[in-house]
Image (cartoon, grey):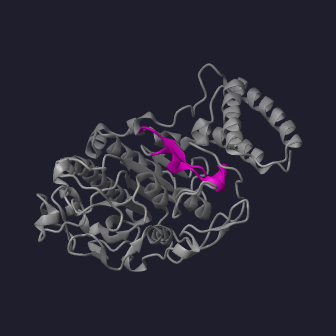
Amino acid sequence: MNNHKFNRQDELTRRQIMVNAARAYLGVTVAPMLGGSLATGAIGATRKSTGPSQLAEHVIFLNMQGGMSHLDTFDPKPKNDEVQGPVEAIPTSGDYEVSQYLPEFAKLADRACVIRSMSSRQGAHEQGQYLLHRSYSPRGTIVHPAIGSWVVRHKGRKNTTLPGFVTVGTNPKNASAGFFGADYQGVPLGRPDEGLKDSKRPNSVSEQNFTKRLAIADVLNKKFHESYKSQDVKSYDSLYDEAVNLMKSEDLKAFDIKLEPSSTRSKYGKDSFGQGCLLARRLVEVGVRFVEVGLGGWDTHYDNFTSVAARAAVLDKGFSTLVQDLEAKGLLETTLVVIGTEFGRTPNIVTEHNNGRDHHPACFSTVMAGAGIKGGTTYGKSDREARRPEEKAVSVQDFNATIGYALGVDSQKILHSPSGRPFRMAGAEKDIGNPIKSIFS
């Protein structure tokens, strides 16, 4: 048995066994710690790496799911009505304009850098999101670690009683640690107002009975480990310890946004994205390394301008409140706030689709703020139609390498999968990303 390799079905079976055992013996479930999918072969090598910057301690990644239109948000072309349509550009507190849909961002533009020359070769949503999160294109033979898992892998946990990586309102797959295994798995939360489910000892189970059940589980685990000496089994065992530590953590209350004053919650907006931004602030405040918050609805093939106006209003309120809140609490200097998306939308306006825009991976925009970023600036430039990068093209791998740079991580450092294959946070050697150092002060 020791030499057997587990397949994906084995993985699902073992996860369900763990969940059922926890319910039966402990009276709780470790599902929050297990995340959406556990891959085999947790790697126990160096957790930290010294990189060139090390300004940031945390990352809040705002994921615009569906392909955010760059023309109608961060790269307007007011002198080209043919591609711009009815959306006007407005001045900002920085040295650039944004669309009229982002009035609150415009006031804080001096804290942010807009990257206007992003480019990708992935024009489908699932593949584009995979690349955005992992710096690799999807393969049928392997699951690559998500960017949050890379961060925890390199930097380690800052708060050892809480997960190092949490996603909110986004695809649970974005929390997958891939071949890194359970130690670096993210915790996917569906809704920000539900807290971390099943993370407290039930009232029906006393502390004394809970301790007894843990002892019974330890005896069973010990016998199992003696028979099956596998790294995977050890990784699953560690989840028990993590679940218990989490249950006893004083910082567990950070997941409960209901503890915030109603006035603060209102500032962020009552929608899930705004409340997710509030939860992200609470989590980095207690030492969570990487938090992703998702905002969907950007797939605007039809009625682009109405849809983008609605989505941008949600983004505008959530982002601006988040940045101001982090700043007020002295956290913006050590927190990198990122707005990312899998691709942009076409300069062509499809009139037969009620003025829609289609997928456009060749050119799009992203944003970085905080953690030493030069605010009020742009990097790169798109052409007159925002169809192609005209200056300083930036790949998705470059983008992720820049996140690593902010954290002091050497994103080109090679780590090996259980099969011995080399991988990097900045992507494969032929597409390896380089950090954009000039956007930092």
Residue 90 can be seen in this image: no
Residue 71 can be seen in this image: yes
Q: Nearer the viewer, residue 393 or 194?
A: 393
Look at the picture and state if 437 lies above or below 345.
below
Q: Quadrant of residue 78?
A: bottom left
The residue shown at (84%, 42%) is 225
State the count of labels: 0
Q: Position of residue 73 (x, y in %)?
A: 23, 60
Q: Position of residue 252 (x, y in %)?
A: 53, 41
Question: Quadrant of the image for the N terminus?
Answer: top right
407 relative position to 67: left or right: right
Look at the picture and state if 211 lies above or below 100.
above
Does 187 appear in magenta?
A: yes
The residue shown at (29%, 67%) is 111
Q: Position of residue 305 (x, y in %)?
A: 18, 51
In this view, the residue farthest toward the front is 352
Q: Quadrant of residue 392?
A: bottom left
Q: Which residues are drawn in magenta?
A: 171-191
Does 106 appear in magenta?
A: no
Look at the picture and state if 371 lies above or below 184.
below
In this view, the residue farthest toward the top is 204
46 relative position to 333: left or right: right
Look at the picture and state if 396 lies above or below 236.
below
Q: Nearer the viewer, residue 287 or 173?
A: 173
Q: Position of residue 23 (x, y in %)?
A: 66, 26
Question: Quadrant of the image for the C terminus?
Answer: bottom left
Q: Nearer the viewer, residue 243 or 351?
A: 351
Q: Nearer the viewer, residue 396 or 195?
A: 396
